[in-house]
Image (cartoon, helix red, strand yellow):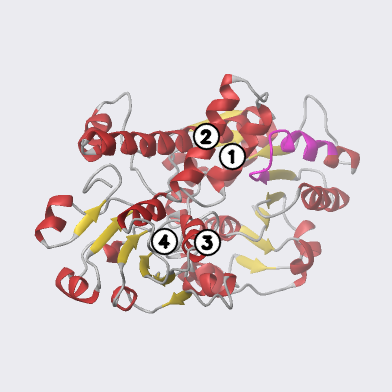
Amino acid sequence: MKISIYGQDVNAVVAATCLAEAGHEVYLSRIGDASKQLSWDESYIEREPGLLTRYRRMLGRNLRVRAFKDARSFGTVQWVFGRGQSDAALQQVFTSLAKAWREGVLYLLTSHHSVGTYQRMGEVLKEGGVPMSDQHCPLVSMPTMIREGVALADFESPALLVVGTNDEFAIATVTQMLRPYINRADKTLFVDGLTAEITRNAISTMLATRLSFMNKLAQLCENLGVDVEVVREAMAGDPRVGSEYLNPGCGFGGDNLADELANVQELLPKGSAARQLVDAVAQTNEEQKEILFRKVWRYYQANIQGRTIAIWGAAFKPGTDSLVNSPILTLLEAFWAQGVITRVYDPQALDALRLRFQGQELLECVDSPYEAAENADALLIVTAWKEFYNPDFEQLKALLAVPAIFDGRNIYEPEVMQELGFEYFGLGRGLRI
């Protein structure tokens, strides 16, 4: 099958690589002005574990990078990944694709745009001359369930695959294209395009709600002197609840959950109970991003000006270098407003951090976690990178000016940290403050 894939994000590259490996002929193209480029920044691909090697292996074989105008006349499947594109830019893409319409072409849309985008892009195709009717709609909504850091595994063995179309030709084409992955999917649903959009929003909003609820529960447990980890384990053991997305943290980031929350907020009437619930989820998350700052503020009784704070982790999650909506952004601004020096280590996101805050004298980006800790007045854990789980605690304690750890991911055991001589403040566990 000939497939043209358009997009600037890792999802597009993952799809192109995997489909090329599955034997399809794939053209990969950027969107917009960058679509004229016939190469891809491999440092961009390298950020996703395992992707660069597989991308290079397929490049020049079943996978080729092509200009937009060449790609649109190639594929019998035209798959658009719309992340990062405005609604107007997305319309331009589909207007251009419609001009190159040929009999038997199927269009796929993967985006985090608002509900109704599927219908609007269908109208754009129809206005551009693509035959569209109630009986035949060659446009499919394909919500992505891919997570950064494990994108290849998510694409190849999806827990849930939702295909938004009722058109028999479209169902047959998508089934043929994705057959290896449908066979490995835990569940595949064929629904109409609008239902697919709502499903995408509903899943992300539920996950965000669980996270925000757990953060509020952690605060309650801390106030009552209860270890939230014991409560969490009990909840996870109940099959009605399950274990996913139950870990308290210092706020979730990325653009997936944030975008979907915003989409749902737009759909719900202001002042309604449902809207208040979703608003509370979003507000709780923003407040949670400041929780480590507030704990340090209380620990030093507001006397923090001129102090040095070590921060381990900047990316919004392990396995990525992305700072999008990361708690580190809120934390840094709060500390800088108080004249606090922030010394940050992250195994992947330091370049992005330096670029974003060029000229900020209160920011120091360092090359090792121990360098960050040297003479620091506290250590904050913001991202749960694996290398942070088992440091040399003796060396760490010797380096810190004050052996106080504020753990925004609850990666350590309070009793162990106490025995090692640290003052340990987790979320809903450890010392209360």
Cα distance, mark 1 to mark 4? 22 Å
The residue tagged 2 is 205
Establish if 40 lies above or below 423.
Answer: below
The residue lying at 20 percent from left, 58 percent from top is: 423
Magenta span contains residue 224: no
Circle nearer the N terminus (4, 2): 2
Asked whether residue 353 appears in the rendered view, the answer is: yes
Numbered disc in front, either 3 or 2 = 3
Is there CB contact under 8 Å for labels 3 and 2?
Answer: no
Circle nearer the N terminus (3, 2): 2
Circle nearer the N terminus (1, 4): 1
Report the amino acid beneath label 4. Answer: Gly
The residue tagged 1 is 260
The residue tagged 4 is 319
* In the image: residue 314, left or right of residue 129: left
Q: Which residues are magenta?
A: 109-123
The residue tagged 3 is 333
| Foreground residue among 279 and 385 | 279
Dot 3 crowding, Cα within 10 Å, few <14, some 14–19, many 20+: few
Establish if 131 lies above or below 416.
Answer: above
Is there CB contact under 8 Å for labels 1 and 2?
Answer: yes
Q: Residue furthest left?
A: 419
* In the image: residue 220, left or right of residue 142: left
Circle nearer the N terminus (3, 1): 1
Report the amino acid beneath label 1. Answer: Glu
Dot 2 crowding, Cα within 10 Å, few <14, some 14–19, many 20+: many
Asked whether residue 164 appears in the rendered view, the answer is: no
The residue lying at 83 percent from left, 48 percent from top is: 102
Cα distance, mark 1 to mark 2? 6 Å
Cα distance, mark 3 to mark 1? 25 Å
